[in-house]
């Protein structure tokens, strides 16, 4: 965990990503302050272009796009943390069990996660949402449930390598229960790679929510960026702002999550870290070798 | 090789069976009447009754499952009232446009991605690497449907170079019109290619960088091979193995991307079909499409496995 | 003089600054001679081996000195010339034969391609010669068809050796060439080295921590510690008339198969961190004979006999106890 923080500090783009995520988080928290009132109220003339009255214009039914966007931030972050959180918990639990016990349980969980990894996730989610409806929390849960196998895989590999290490053996000899060993000894020591992957899964969850909303499968009771895009796509030429701003917001959030996630993943893989070189002034002889 | 193939197929069959079971369970746990879920919202009442009988919906569950499986094996995915055709026929009529879009876009994205990734890795930490990596990460962060909208706004609305939708090339009763198809394919094709490009570029870069630190690369250098040969014949060659794996694993996100692109551009493929099925609540098409796409992805990943075996002599013995 | 290494230094860039892995190493080798490079792991002996071929990892670089092969300085050579002499004149057998061969090509092709890179021979002829080399190292030529993963560890080690020998280099650097092998195979490889030296005047640098293997086939020995050569000279001189406290300790820490068990000399302390270029004797913290000057000044290289040099302040004024030989005497 501390390693992650230190690694992230060394990666400037990662820090930039983290700052952006923090900013977006702040926007979501202060939504009632910076965009007071019901974002759904249709009090204005439709299709007002961005200007001093409406920073980002109004939409096809006279709602303020700025207010919709500010409140939409909450939905995106809810999906980011909610779905990735569900996936994190499930992945660590199932991966931990598979790696710790091995044998038949491992086979079963591994086969299940293989199957989940291969099926077209978005199609599955669409079918479920079409059949069961688009209530916010259910969709968060469904996305989380489709994401766990990647975390389980990482966790399983970590546990299998940690299981035979000295401190785990020591805990076992000392009479620790399986649960105490898995959650007390192994989990804290294998959190790094799973967390790095979780940041990338947050991006995936945000994107999936936006895709669903864009396909008309969003929860109509909450404002979201994908929803603005969904209604805005019909007015591309007459009201392009309906499409430009939510798309940009999505891209910025995804980019910042990708920056953080990539920085973490790279920091955990020593082979991908930038190579340090002996300064030219200290080298003797011929020109430095070609780099690969 | 045949034995390996046999084993892989044996591993994949349970996955497909699980998918079928899953579909069956979905129909039954969905809110409302399973018959409605099987028939879709546009089906008339008489048909729903007929369906209740033919799927044995009043029988115990295991009998229902038997009937369901039997129908599937016969290729019966149900009947779509929205299209007044069997679901399988509807799906097959949309297969070619999707395969065309997906196939051609990957023919562009995979080689281009490998070249960009290899270039970045070859000049690691240089300005070239930084700009390739940064632009790939940025591209990867743009939602594909938004990229589609931007392309429409720019190329179709503003510049009016290319049409954004309305292709007639596949219309019934006419011979296919390659020119019309190509014109309409250009935008969705570019969007899908740009969407998948970063996946290949990034994995190529990473695996080349890792492969370049392999001991066998030191050996190749020690032998005296020129750097270009060391890079191409050793580092890149070894790095293509993980690229193949990732290509196989990203098949499902490729089809997801295709669904969104087809929706944006009204491209008459399976993705657009699924989208229309959602808004018409045409459940047979929706679930049939899910099953069909899943089987395609599973088979596609089997094909990448075979390519992998061809590339890596070690696999056969594992 | 086939190989003349003069004052060679190597450094690696790390997160915490430069790491000076090899410092001011000098040694000489004639054609047909063999040199044993011995020392604890981490003393820089493998790094020195790689540096002789200018084959350091990306974060490493030669920071000073010269490596002259038949008078040509490898350190200052053009890339092109370097590629031409690599493998043709100077080849290396890597310690990690398991991963040193390319996993995706047949071993015969790997050997034949290496040969064809340097010699104007046809593919068929190259494969034939590869087969000859295979038989020389004790592997059936039918196995040229196979991939590395079909070889056992010991077989891979021999295949690597065949790869190193196929171009007929003047100098072969062998990094722990016998470690992965069983006793019978070790014997074969050592005999092969001896024959090759006699037949074609192959010069050999054997990097090893196996003092008995070194004592069996080497004419010269260099004892490394903390990135420096502590003692260098003819095998007999270094092993029987050692003048450096570290050589004494190293020889006494080596168990013998032929003698009753005895207490091994365990050195307290650990090898130095090499963050700074040396300003003292690297052995000072573990040396039982250390005096004030040892930590204040880097010891000079002192000539103590014909071709026998020691890097020690006290080379002339300490008497190192003769102890039980922990190894077999030099052959012949």
Image (tube, coloured by chain):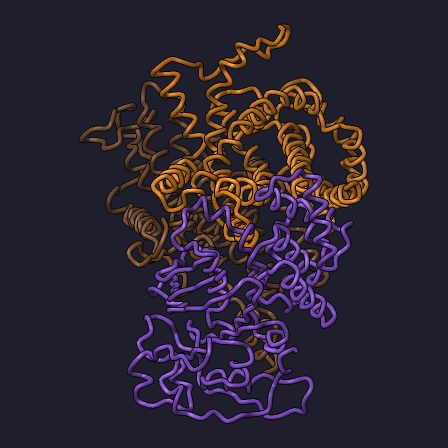
Chain colours: A brown, B orange, C purple
Counting the numbered discs, the total is 0
Q: In this view of the protein, which residue sits in the foreground, C310 or B314?
A: C310
Left or right: where A179 falls relative to B140: right
Residue pictured at 61% horizontal, 39% vertical: C120
The residue sitting at the left extreme is A52
- Residue beneath the point at 24% across and 28% down: A50
Q: Hey, which quadrant is residue A69 in on the image?
A: top left
Residue at position x 49%, y 69% in the image: C45
Nearest the eye: A239 or C57: C57
Question: From where the camera sits, is residue A269 visible?
Answer: no
Q: Position of residue C293 (x, y in %)?
A: 30, 86
**Where the N terminus of chain B falls, by quadrant?**
top right
Q: Position of residue C108 (x, y in %)?
A: 69, 47
In the depicted structure, whether residue C230 falls above or below residue A85 = below
- Left or right: residue A28 versus residue B121 is left
Please, which residue is most extreme toward the top here?
B174
Q: Position of residue A223 (x, y in %)?
A: 38, 38
Residue C122 location, quadrant: top right
User: Residue A80, percent across and down?
Assistant: 43, 48
Q: Residue at x 58, y 83 (%)?
A: C254
Q: Is residue A174 above or below residue B217?
A: below
Q: Mark yes or no: residue B4 visible.
A: yes
Which sits in the foreground, B283 or C298? C298
Q: Nearer the viewer, residue A289 or C324?
A: C324
Task: Please state if A109 lies on the left or on the right of B202 as rendered.
Answer: right
């Amino acid at each position: 965990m501390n390693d992650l923080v230190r690694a992230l500090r060394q990666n400037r783009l990662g820090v930039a990503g983290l700052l952006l995520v923090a900013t977006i988080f702040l926007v979501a928290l202060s939504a009632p302050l910076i965009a007071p009132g019901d974002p759904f109220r249709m009090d204005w003339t439709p299709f007002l272009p961005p200007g001093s009255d409406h920073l980002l214009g109004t939409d096809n039914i006279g709602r303020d796009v700025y207010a919709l966007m500010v409140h939409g931030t909450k939905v995106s972050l809810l999906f980011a943390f909610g779905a990735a959180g569900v996936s994190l918990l499930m992945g660590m639990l199932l991966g931990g069990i598979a790696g710790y016990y091995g044998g038949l349980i491992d086979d079963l969980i591994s086969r299940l996660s293989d199957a989940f990894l291969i099926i077209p996730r978005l199609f599955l989610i669409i079918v479920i949402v079409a059949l069961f409806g688009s209530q916010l929390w259910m969709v968060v849960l469904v996305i989380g449930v489709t994401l766990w196998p990647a975390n389980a895989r990482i966790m399983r590999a970590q546990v299998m390598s940690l299981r035979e290490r000295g401190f785990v053996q020591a805990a076992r000899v000392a009479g620790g229960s399986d649960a105490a060993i898995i959650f007390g000894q192994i989990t804290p020591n294998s959190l790094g790679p799973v967390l790095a992957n979780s940041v990338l899964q947050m991006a995936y969850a945000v994107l999936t929510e936006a895709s669903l909303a864009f396909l008309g499968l969003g929860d109509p009771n909450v404002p979201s960026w994908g929803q603005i895009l969904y209604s805005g796509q019909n007015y591309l030429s007459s009201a392009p702002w309906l499409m430009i701003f939510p798309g940009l917001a999505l891209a910025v959030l995804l980019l910042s999550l990708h920056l953080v996630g990539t920085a973490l993943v790279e920091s955990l893989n020593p082979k991908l870290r930038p190579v340090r070189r002996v300064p030219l002034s200290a080298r003797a002889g011929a020109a430095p070798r070609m780099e690969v | 090789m045949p034995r390996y193939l046999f084993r892989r197929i044996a591993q994949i069959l349970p996955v497909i069976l699980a998918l079928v079971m899953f579909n069956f369970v979905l129909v039954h746990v969905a809110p409302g009447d399973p018959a409605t879920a099987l028939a879709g919202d546009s089906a008339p009442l008489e048909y729903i009754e007929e369906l209740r009988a033919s799927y044995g919906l009043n029988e115990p569950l295991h009998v229902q499952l038997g009937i369901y499986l039997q129908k599937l094996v016969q290729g019966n995915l149900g009947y779509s009232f929205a299209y007044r055709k069997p679901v399988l026929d509807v799906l097959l009529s949309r297969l070619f446009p999707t395969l065309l879009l997906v196939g051609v876009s990957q023919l562009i994205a995979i080689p281009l991605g490998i070249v960009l990734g290899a270039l970045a890795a070859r000049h690691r930490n240089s300005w070239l690497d930084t700009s390739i990596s940064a632009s790939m990460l940025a591209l990867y962060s743009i939602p594909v449907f938004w990229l589609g909208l931007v392309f429409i706004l720019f190329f179709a609305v503003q510049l009016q170079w290319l049409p954004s939708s309305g292709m007639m090339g596949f219309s019934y009763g006419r011979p296919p019109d390659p020119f019309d198809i190509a014109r309409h394919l250009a935008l969705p094709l570019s969007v899908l290619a740009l969407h998948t490009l970063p996946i290949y570029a990034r994995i190529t870069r990473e695996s080349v960088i890792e492969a370049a630190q392999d001991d066998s690369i030191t050996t190749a250098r020690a032998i005296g091979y020129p750097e270009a040969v060391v890079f191409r014949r050793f580092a890149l060659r070894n790095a293509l193995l993980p690229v193949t794996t990732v290509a196989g694993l990203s098949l499902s996100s490729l089809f997801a991307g295709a669904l969104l692109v087809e929706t944006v551009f009204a491209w008459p493929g399976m993705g657009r079909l699924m989208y229309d099925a959602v808004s018409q609540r045409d459940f047979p098409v929706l679930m049939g499409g899910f099953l069909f796409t899943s089987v395609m992805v599973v088979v596609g990943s089997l094909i990448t496995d075979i390519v992998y075996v061809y590339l890596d002599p070690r696999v056969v013995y594992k | 003089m086939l190989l003349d290494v003069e004052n060679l230094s190597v450094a690696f860039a790390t997160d915490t600054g430069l790491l000076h892995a090899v410092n001011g190493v000098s040694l000489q080798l004639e054609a047909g001679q063999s040199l044993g490079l011995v020392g604890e792991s981490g003393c820089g002996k493998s790094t020195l081996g790689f540096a002789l071929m200018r084959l350091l990892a990306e974060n490493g670089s030669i920071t000073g000195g010269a490596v002259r092969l038949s008078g040509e300085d490898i350190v200052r050579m053009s890339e092109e010339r370097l590629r031409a002499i690599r493998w043709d004149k100077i080849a290396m057998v890597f310690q990690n034969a398991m991963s040193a061969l390319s996993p995706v090509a047949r071993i015969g092709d790997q050997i034949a391609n290496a040969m064809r890179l340097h010699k104007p021979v046809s593919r068929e002829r190259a494969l034939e010669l590869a087969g000859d080399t295979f038989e020389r190292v004790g592997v059936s030529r039918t196995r040229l068809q196979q991939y590395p993963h079909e070889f056992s560890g010991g077989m891979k080690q021999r295949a690597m050796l065949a790869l190193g020998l196929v171009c007929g280099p003047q100098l072969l650097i062998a990094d722990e060439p016998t470690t992965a092998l069983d006793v019978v195979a070790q014997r074969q490889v050592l005999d092969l080295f001896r024959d090759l030296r006699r037949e074609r005047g192959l010069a050999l640098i054997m990097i090893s921590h196996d003092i008995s293997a070194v004592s069996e086939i080497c004419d010269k020995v260099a004892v490394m510690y903390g990135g420096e050569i502590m003692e260098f000279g003819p095998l007999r001189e270094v092993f029987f008339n050692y003048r450096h406290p570290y050589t004494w300790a190293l020889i006494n820490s080596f168990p013998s198969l032929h003698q009753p068990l005895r207490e091994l000399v365990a050195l307290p302390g650990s090898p130095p961190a090499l963050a700074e270029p040396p300003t003292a004797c690297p052995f000072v913290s573990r040396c039982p004979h250390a005096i004030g000057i040892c930590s204040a000044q880097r010891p000079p290289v002192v000539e103590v006999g014909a071709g026998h040099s020691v890097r020690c302040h006290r080379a002339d004024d300490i008497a190192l106890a003769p102890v039980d030989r922990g190894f077999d005497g030099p052959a012949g």
